[in-house]
């Protein structure tokens, strides 16, 4: 298994547990993702070693063909981190913004305009990104409750599973829990995952 290095220390791009197993096998979900056009993803403020190494690892893995990253961050900061890590930025577009709050706002703007299909959090704080997402004028709000899901696979369990809302809704009431659960179900269906 790969290990993420301590801040500022990296001997190459690494990412734990999200890459294809050593035997080269691919999960069904990754295999299906490779059969469609790459998803353009706004990578929001990847200005530390762990964030940029994760992006480089994803691009070097079986997942690399499934995404088209667009880095939204201060160009000089990203370049400095890339130089320290030995990561070549030439393959990625960079939307240059002055700071992390601007990166979050710009990424949300790109998503609302349909220029990117997903947001990937970099080294900015979660509350910075989520504040831009949930802002009244963001263009991303719907009538549904915002929640988040981890889709996980492990050799110890025969199929993918979803861990939902470990961070966004701190103390949901029963109606909010129902909405969070429905979001996870909707995500499972959207990804083509069907649970017995």
Image (cartoon, rainbow, N blue to C red):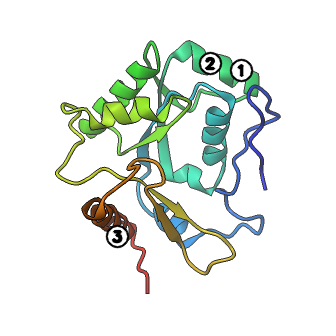
Name the residue at 59% across, 21% down. Answer: 78
Q: Secondary structure at mark 2?
A: helix
Q: Nearer the viewer, residue 5 or 167?
A: 167
Q: Quadrant of residue 113?
A: top left
Q: Is residue 14 left or right of residue 32?
A: right
The residue singled out by tag 3 in the image is: 185
Query: Above or below — where is 143 with respect to 10?
Result: below
Name the residue at 68% across, 76% down. Answer: 156
Q: Secondary structure at mark 1?
A: helix
Between circles 3 and 1, the one closer to the viewer is 3
Q: Which mark is residue 170?
A: none
Q: Is residue 125 left or right of residue 108?
A: right
The residue singled out by tag 1 in the image is: 83
Are dots 1 and 2 in contact, CB under 8 Å? yes
Q: Secondary structure at mark 3?
A: helix
Residue 152 in the image: x percent, y percent?
56, 64
């Amino acid at each position: 298994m790969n290990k993420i290095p301590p801040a500022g220390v990296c001997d190459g791009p690494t990412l734990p547990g999200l890459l294809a197993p050593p035997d080269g096998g691919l999960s069904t979900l990754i295999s299906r993702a490779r059969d469609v056009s790459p998803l353009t993803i706004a990578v929001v403020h990847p200005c530390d070693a762990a964030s940029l190494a994760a992006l480089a690892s994803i691009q070097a893995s079986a997942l690399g063909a499934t995404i088209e990253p667009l880095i939204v961050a201060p160009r000089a900061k990203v370049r400095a981190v890339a130089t320290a890590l030995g990561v070549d930025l030439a393959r990625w577009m960079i939307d240059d913004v002055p700071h992390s709050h601007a990166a979050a706002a710009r990424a949300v703007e790109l998503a609302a305009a349909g220029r990117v299909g997903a947001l990937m959090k970099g080294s900015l704080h979660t509350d910075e990104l989520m504040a831009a997402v949930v802002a009244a004028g963001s263009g991303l709000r719907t009538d549904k409750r915002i929640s988040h899901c981890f889709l996980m696979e492990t050799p110890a369990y025969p199929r993918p599973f979803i861990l939902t809302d470990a961070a966004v809704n701190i103390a949901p009431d029963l109606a909010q829990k129902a909405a969070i659960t429905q979001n996870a179900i909707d995500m499972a269906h959207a990804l083509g995952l069907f649970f017995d």
